[in-house]
Image: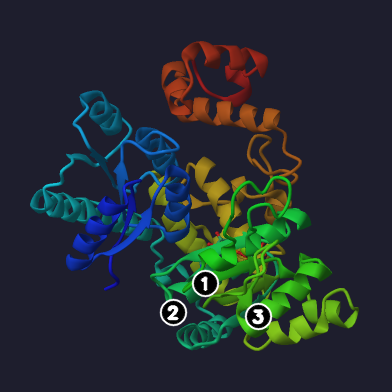
Amino acid sequence: MRKKKILIVDDEKLIRWTLSQKLNKWNLEASTAENGAQGLRLAEEETPDLVMLDVKLPDKKGTDLLMELKKAQPELPVIMMTGFGVIEDAVTAMRRGAYDFITKPIDYTKLQNTVKNALEAASLKQEIAYYKEKEQNRFDADQIITNSKAMKQILEMVKKIAESEASIILLQGESGTGKDLLAQAIHHLSRRRNASYLAINCSAIPDNLLESELFGYEKGAFTDAKAQKKGLVELADGGTLFLDEISTLNLHLQAKLLRFLEIHSFKRVGGLKDIEVDIRVIAATNQDIELASREEKFRRDLFYRLNVCPVYIPPLRERREDILPLANHFIFHYDKKFRKSIKGLDKQTEKLFLEYDWPGNVRELKNAVERAMIFEENSSITAKYLPIHLNGDSFSSPEGSLDETSDQNLSLYDMEQKLMIQALKKTNGNKTKAARLLNITRDVLRYKIKKFNITPERFHFSE
Ligand SMILES: Nc1ncnc2c1ncn2[C@@H]1O[C@H](COP(=O)(O)OP(=O)(O)OP(=O)(O)O)[C@@H](O)[C@H]1O
Ligand SMILES: [Mg+2]
């Protein structure tokens, strides 16, 4: 295990020297600073595990430096030292988050204990944070549902690629086919699973920001660069970086990415130093980038570099065997979430699902199921609450579908009105219950009933 690093900030040379000697003897690594400014810089550059800080420094108060350190690294343990036990300083220091306070002349037995405890507490905290995050990002390979030969073959291939040392993978497929999901699967099936998985959508960020988002920048690289910033490429070291919608990268960034993929090192914006990292890049696109490269909209050399391990996910209409398993999977999911008891699709809906082309692929299917699950009163999903383009001629009741035109065209007004009606229907017109169901007050409900002119006769419930 690597030695823990301790930063000593004290203006007295003798103290710095004796303390360093002691720390080395305790198998710790020491670095020293003789004033506040230097201390702050070393704390940033060397990321120590603990700081020992003198209360009286030539350029600033130790307790002020403590505050600056804590602001940048809240979990960093700091032990304050003072020549004469000034009680006010001790109180301020503890209030500003110091781990402990020791007085000079230093009692080294006591100090050794304090240092040991502080380091243990800090690494315990880190470990807890690590597991918490891991728990949140836990990925379950069973989440990928498939019954089609095509997808099964792809998953087998993906598993092999994931376990290999391939450092670049290209995922292609229409929107909603599962590229995001697959990229996460690849990370979790790889030896990198315990390191970071970072994702960025290249089309969602303006070009000028994207470069520094990816590669970071040095202090002073441009007007707003007040401090150094690490980019995703650096932060993902040891892990996986998912670059979504790669086709939208501009030519300048394409060149930078290509260079990085070739030499595995890069410079921060405004930086001179080459920084080497070990990451796997998964790039995804729903465009045909081979075509784009032939049309010179995408660098051909970058396309070849990315295309070493290509994975193509076919659209849902080309693997119809997946439709019903996916639908049932989502029904099961929302059934639990919405506390319904809906078990599946009825025969007519099953047929509609199987015949429909799903241009929005799995995402569209998932959304259709979710919406139907909200409103369905039966024990299986009927065609009643399906979007009209799926529902075809069988579409009937005016308040039936939440998606009569398309998601985008449905106004908030319509949506709200439909929710009110559904809630009142469900509760047989009982306003108290309906209000509770909608999580609004009875007054608000009464107001809305008036606003939308919801009369009992119109929607067949008795008051
Ligand atoms: N085989 C599958 N099993 C279960 N869920 C799936 C499957 N494929 C896709 N999904 C789900 O469908 C939704 C859309 O998938 P995803 O976001 O991965 O698509 P995408 O290809 O990245 O789309 P886009 O190109 O629009 O970014 C997600 O909620 C995902 O979890
Ligand atoms: Mg995606």
Q: Quadrant of ligand 2?
A: bottom right
Look at label 3 and name its amino acid.
Answer: Leu
- Residue 70 to residue 310: above or below: above
Q: Quadrant of residue 89?
A: top left
Who comes first in sequence, dot 2 or dot 3? 2
Look at label 2 and name its amino acid.
Answer: Ser
Q: Is residue 335 left or right of residue 30?
A: right
> Which residue has dot 2 on it?
190
Who comes first in sequence, dot 1 or dot 3? 1
Residue plotted at (73% across, 51% down): 222
Is the residue marked by circle 2 packed among few (<14), some (14-19), or many (20+) residues within 10 Å?
some
Mark-to-mark CA distance, 1 and 3: 13 Å
- Residue 71 to residue 328: above or below: above
Classify mark 3: helix, strand or loop. Answer: helix
Comparing 220 with 71, the one in front is: 220
> Which residue has dot 3 on it?
261
- Residue 4 to residue 381: above or below: below
> Which residue has dot 1 on it?
240
Q: Are marks 1 and 3 in contact (CB under 8 Å)?
A: no
Residue plotted at (55% across, 51% down): 382
Q: Quadrant of residue 415?
A: top right
Mark-to-mark CA distance, 1 and 2: 9 Å
